[in-house]
Amino acid sequence: MMSLRPKRVRTRLTLLYVGMLAGVLAVYFAGVSLLLFWQMSGILKRLAAEDLETIKGLLYLQGDDQVGVREDYHHHTDWKQVQERLLEILGPDGSILYRNERLGSRTIGGAPFAGEGEHGYSGRSARMSDGTPIILISRKYDLQGRTILIRVGYSQNLIWNQLKETLLVLLLASPVVLAGTAYAGYKMVGRTLSPVSKMAHRAEQINSEHLNERLPIENPEDELGHLARVFNAMLSRIEQSFEQLQRFTADASHELRTPLAAIRSIGEVRLQEDAKPEEYRDTIGSMLEEVNRLSAIVESLLTLSRADAGQIRMQVSVFPLKALVREAAALLEVLIEDKRLTFTLAGDETVGAQADRLYIRQAVINILHNAVKFTPPGGSISAHVECKSDSRVELSVSDSGPGISAEHSAKVFERFYRVDEARTGDDMGAGLGLSVAKWAVEANNGEIGMINLPGAGARFWIRLPAVGCPSNHEMRH
Amino acid sequence: MASDNQTQMRILIVEDEEKMATALRTGLEADQFSVSVAHTGEEGFFLASTETYDLVILDLMLPRRDGMEVLAALRQKGVSVPVLILTSKDTVRDRVRGLDAGADDYLVKPFAFSELLARIRALLRRGKPELGDRLRLADLEMDASGRKIFRDGKELTLTAREFDLLEYLLRQQGRVVSREMLARDVWQETARYTPLDNVIDVHIAHLRRKLDEPFRKKLLHTVRGVGFVLREETP
């Protein structure tokens, strides 16, 4: 079934508007008619009363039981009031003494009721014997010793006709009024809504190519302006994440392309001439190394994209942070020894971090690994665990490496970001280690950051929700 | 060293991708297995339910009949052959689904071939006695429970980690072991993105210094791009 509801807001609003106006007009017309009716019946009654007085003066007795009216009194007998007048004169017993021509054989009001016209004028609506509604005024008089009841009536059709005419005029005028209103309303709604269609038009043009476009704001104060502003803010956020995504995709394909290019050229070069079996072995081995790097990158990318999609659930527990750092350091111990680095771990043994242990362990390993990688042989790394407030614990890892220049330090946690563009060729060499750490820490309601130490070296820190920090802890400095 | 059984073990590979299937067949045949290949789920189901195999390697994404369906149908039919799933789907849910459907093991692509071989051997060895505590290769002797290791009659002093590493290599002697396998089985690291490769390489270097450097005959070899192997070099 098709809905009769108009689709466009503009049409709907206009129809609603016109409908409401029509309703108001109808009520208004009804009110006007009622008032008119009241007023006109009042006027008619007054006329009838005046008429009645006039007639009284024109009466004369005709024999015992007839009354005459000197109709010739009226100079203009074509006067409408005279023509329309219905006149009946009754005796006290209800006997008919006079009926004027217009009345003929009809009666108005029937037998007199008790007290009719005795004290002033009795006015009422009545029906004639043939059913015509009338306004009726009656009065008792004494005519030369005889009591008579004079009744003057006017047909209510007079009023109705007047009403009809007035209503007709009003009704004839109303379509014009309504049409005018509809037109004006349609225009006005159109103008009000025009920012919306402009916004819609502009929004249609915004796609991935034109994400920098914004919706027009005509009046920032009104509701539509507010809508546009909210929309624009949303566009900014989308644009931002879109750019991030594009950069990420570009970086990722670069990272994937590099080992692919290596595999390809290594293979091609080897196949150009015959070689000894050891040489083939070596070539294949070298290709496999690149394959391993590819796998590691894909693996990390998958992890990060799952993390982005919120598919990884944290299993929160409370564990002593220092013990975790010790465990991570033990894993890397052999690397530390190999580079003759000194590693020290200090701080509160008992403070617990409240987080997913496995992922925080991963983060700590990555941070330590990063420190080991960038500290020159013979250097030192020191890790420190301490409470920063009664509910935050911080682990800081300081190294005696070269530090990270200001231009790089803001980006060290970005995916694929490498301070040193030369490939290191190790497992997490794709520059994902610290971004994995950042994700893991932040997914556990923690913060991660990095500062350069005065002199040389860098300090990476993570802060996590803590259990077991003294509540009135003296904050350092 | 590879032929520890007189009778050849029979393996069915259900894999639609031609190159992958060929690589698997070649690799497994080189390791003395008898191999059949099915290229569709239906063919795989037919072969697995009519012939007798010691192991089925099942890809999940197959034309016509999905690997998971094939597995469920086989188990419903009462075919109890060990099944190893090979797939590129690697979420925990996928793994659980596969193991619930009756798979015995689950290996995610891309994988190291040495890892596949190790898993296959583990599945085939199920219920059979372990090698024991006394391990031996050429003039190398290990007492695993006493945690002692001798080469040419002289005891070597190894750190705990080096000992574990050597024991693992010795148990897998003659077979190439990948860094992933070492990370998982010796270091017990489950997360694949832990940066352990450097750590493993340094440990291998240390081990090599103690194990091989003083001796003329080298036992611990690096297979470039693949991993490490402990064996007597056959020139």
Image: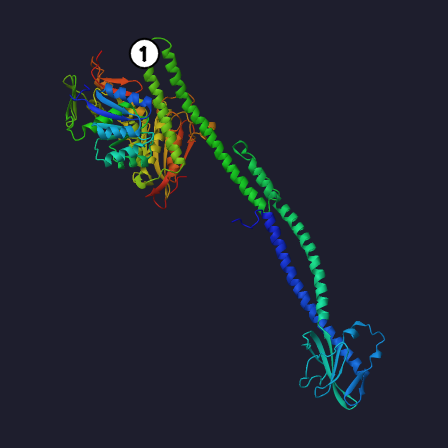
Q: Chain of mark 1?
A: A
User: Observer-nearest residue: A114 or A350?
Assistant: A114
Q: Quadrant of the C terminus of chain A?
A: top left
- Give the image location of residue B233, x and y in percent: 22, 14
- The quarter of the picture where residue A421 lies is top left
* A145 vs A133: above or below: below
Q: Is residue A321 visible?
A: no
* B154 vs A170: above or below: above
- The quarter of the picture where residue B202 lies is top left
Q: Is residue B150 left or right of residue A72?
A: left
- Give the image location of residue A228, x and y in percent: 56, 42
**Local SS, label 1:** helix
Q: Is residue A47 visible?
A: yes
Q: Residue furthest bottom?
A: A145
User: Observer-nearest residue: A344 or A363?
Assistant: A363
Q: Which residue is mark 1?
A: A279
Q: Is residue A262 left or right of residue A202?
A: left
- Give the image location of residue A3, x and y in percent: 54, 50
- The quarter of the picture where residue A77 lies is bottom right
Q: Callout 1, which amino acid? A: Glu
